[in-house]
Image (cartoon, grey):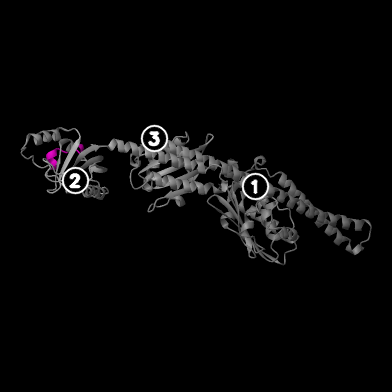
Amino acid sequence: MEQKQQIESPQESILQNAFNAAQTGVWHWDIDQDRIRINDAWARLIGYAPEELAPFDTAHWLNLCHPEDRKRVSDTLSRALKMKNKHFSFRTRLRHKNGDWIWGQFNGGVTEPDSINERPALSGTLTDVTELYHSKNNLRYRYEIEKLVSEITSNFVGIPFQDTDKTIDQALQKIGQFMNVDRCYVFQFRENGTLMDNTHEWHTKGIKPQMGHLQNLPSSIFPWWMNSLSKFEHLYIQRVKDLPTEAISEKEILQSQSIISLLVVPIHYQQKLLGFIGFDSVVREKEWLEADIHLMNTVAHAVASALNAKNFQEALVLAKEKAEESDQIKSAFLATINHELRTPLHHILGFSDLLRMRKIPVAEISNFADKIYKSGKNLLQIIEDILSLAQADESSVKVRKEYLLGKDLFIQHKSLLDEMLKSASKEQSLKLHYNPCPSFLNSYFISDNSKINQVIINLLKNAIKFTNSGSIEYRAEIKNKELSFHIKDTGIGITQDQQKLIFDFFRQVDDSSTRIYSGVGIGLAISKRITTILQGELTVCSIPGKGSTFTLKIPIETAVNLQKATRNL
């Protein structure tokens, strides 16, 4: 502030005293000399003593203004001078001595030359309107965010379930941009809440997406986090670095993603936790108001309703498809059974009738009897398959632990394969390769002999049935307390799509193959069930036209010798 000049007249002295004593900021700008007089209240409004601002001119004044406001202030003053406005007003941000910005309301006018003012000047007042400004801004902000939330929630009403994901993505983008966060996302739980997947994500430019890396996560990695969500409570973490010691797992994971602050809101529907919505701040710390958190809960409820409706619709569609598929499978099964039962029965009845009527030459009786016998065996096999199906309930089957030697099991399998190949009359067209590893042949172990044989028999039958020429290979080994069998053939093979179906009941490679190769299509399905009972794994690797390899893996208990194994049983 410029040094006070000597007062030359009583009138000017009175005005000067009034100027300094005013409680409102007062300013007077001598345009010709570019000197601005301000009173104590003006200086105190921005945290200064008057002498700290001396000398004060327009450059100093504009320098105190916010950079975004300077041009507007300068233009307003210039226009007032040019138009000789008696009244003008504007608002600008002024930097306080402590670094904050305050909002100042400037009112003023141009004074014409008179006995006191020899030249034109600008004079006016300054009032602190920061609180009023923030109050109006808060009202405007509350109106805008409530309008946004209302719009988002209404968008979820009555949408087709096919549009649910798109609507969620749009909602995340709108909220993320309005709330000025760096990333918004939705996680959904599955498998009774034990696993979670990042299903939706929005992020600002320059922020690395995370959704691709956050799939199939066990929810147990967030124990502290899940404790709150399970109570349908939100999680507001203003500073990740300040998380408590019991949240050490969450802290490490969040910091690995450079997250500074975040808000997590549960998504739940009728006391069932479906997932959560997260809002990450990566660039700077984010403070959330309680009212805003409440509105985010409102959005989460809308998302929950939409996800629940979508899940319900998808369940209905799946149930409908399964019902239709079940009908198709039943029809296919009945058609197959009709064909498979009638064929051997017709043979048996026809050939038997010829024998009964003695219309067959004596030399051919043995041949016809052989055909009746084979047809009877086929019929018996179909009946046994159907009975096996009736007993395929895993819960009613018990595992019988037996002491086994790999060499003995191999001899059984070799004998079975040789016999089945002979019965199929394919001894000349198929070569058999036996490759049991020494680790298998010389090992003592404990498992269920009959169930292993039942699976191996089904696999060998399939290999012979679907391989007209070429070879069948049998391999067996024991490694890391796991018994493995590999049945490889050079048969017709199985397409990738069909590989997903062959372990289902009544499903075969295709209808044409069913007719060509016969069978009711339950052998592999039963084998899969038995493998599950043995806590093992049955898989297939196949190339159409090249052949298939079925692999059976079963966990076993190893034993050093007969005596030790017997004691363990």
At 25% from the left edge and 47% from the top edge, which residue is drawn? 76
Compare residues 44 and 441 and report the one nearer the observer. Answer: 44
Please identify, in this view, whether the residue under mark 3 or under mark 1 is nearer the observer.
Answer: 3
Q: CA distance from mark 3 to mark 1?
A: 55 Å
**SS state under label 3:** helix
Secondary structure category for the residue under label 2? helix
Q: Mark on residue 61?
A: 2
Residue 337 vertical placement versus 305 (above, below): below
The magenta stretch spans which residues? Answer: 45-53
Amino acid at pointer 1:
Arg
Find out whether residue 6 is within the magenta segment: no
In the shown orientation, is residue 527 left or right of residue 179?
Answer: right
* Amino acid on which the number 3 mark rests in the picture: Glu
Residue 238 percent coordinates (x, y): 35, 39
Tell me the quarter of the picture where residue 135 sits: top left
Q: Earlier in the sequence, mark 1 or mark 2?
A: 2
Rendering coords of residue 78 (x, y %): 22, 49
Quarter residue 543 falls in: bottom right
Identify the residue position indicated by label 3 in the image: 290
Provide the secondary structure element on which disc 1 rests: helix
**Looking at the image, is mark 3 or mark 1 earlier in the sequence?**
3
- Residue type at mark 2? Trp
- The residue where tag 1 is placed is 529
Residue 114 coordinates in the image, percent (x, y)? 13, 42
